[in-house]
Amino acid sequence: MSFTPLTPSAQLAFRRDQISAFLLSGAPRPGDGADLGCPGRPVCPGALWKNRRMAHDVTQPEPTLPPWRRTTQDGAPYWTKNYQPGVPIDIELPTESLCSLLDTAVREAGNHVATQFFGAEMTYRELGDRVARAAEGLRRLGVHAGDRVAILLPNCPQHLIAFYAIVRLGAVVVEHNPLYTAPELEKLFADHGARVAIALDASIDKLNQLPIYERPT
C-alpha cells in the first residue's frame, strides 16, 4: 500500500507557530444573546451587525465595551475600521458554487496572485490548472461524487488545491489536523470512512498504522 502526495514538494517543514489559525475577535461569547432578547444564547458577529442598533450600548463609554460589541461612529462593526479603502462592509452573497467562483477568478484575474507562501507566489491561472490536474488524478483513483476524501495537510497552497480538486468532483472534503496521532486518526476514519487521503509524507506512517479496514487506499 502506498500513498502519493499531492505534489513532490510535500516535504514541508512546519512548526506549530507557523501553522496559520484565525481568531475571530467577534467569536460568540456565552450570555451575549441577552443583548438580542435571548439570554444565555451565543450570538455571532453577523447577528450583531444585522442588529447594529442594539450592538452599541449607549449606557457605557465606548472604550469600556469589549471589542466585539464596539461600533464605529457610523454604526459599523468596530473591526471594520481596519479595512483597506474601497473594501465594502456589506457584500452581496454569491449564489454560484465554489468551483464556479474559482473558474471566474481564473478567467477574469488569471495573472493576479492567488496565494503567497514563504515567498512563493501562485497566480489564479496556475491555481486553476493545478486544481484541474489534481481533480483528474483523484478521478483516476476512483473518486466519485459523494465519496469522502481525507486531507491531512497544514495551511499551504497544496491544501487549497486539494480542497478545490475534491469539491470539483462533487466529493466530500474531510479535514484533519496533520498533527493528529494514529489513535486519533483511527477514530475519525472509522467514523467517516474515507478511502482516499491526501497527506504529507510525515503523515503516511500514521495512516499505515490504522487497521486495514480503516485505511484509505
Image: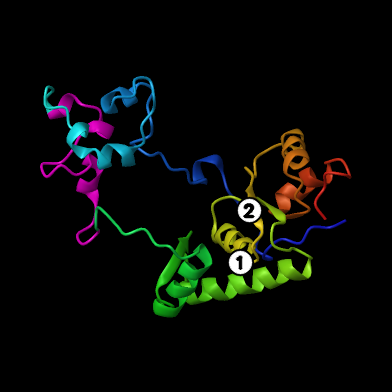
Q: Position of residue 96 (x, y in %)?
A: 46, 65
Q: Is residue 93 left or right of residue 169?
A: left
Question: What residue lies at 22% left-to-right and 33% top-to-bottom?
Answer: 55
Question: What residue lies at 13% left-to-right and 23% top-to-bottom?
Answer: 60
Q: Residues within 10 Å of mark 2 (few under 14, many from 20)?
A: many
Q: Earlier in the sequence, mark 1 or mark 2?
A: 1
Q: Secondary structure at mark 1?
A: helix
- The amino acid sitting under disc 1 is Arg
Q: Which residue is mark 2?
A: 173
Res 147 quadrant in image: bottom right
Q: Is residue 102 left or right of residue 86?
A: right
Label of residue 168 in the image: 1
111 w.r.t. 21: above or below: below
Q: Is residue 25 left or right of residue 14?
A: left
- The amino acid sitting under disc 2 is Val
Magenta region? 62-87
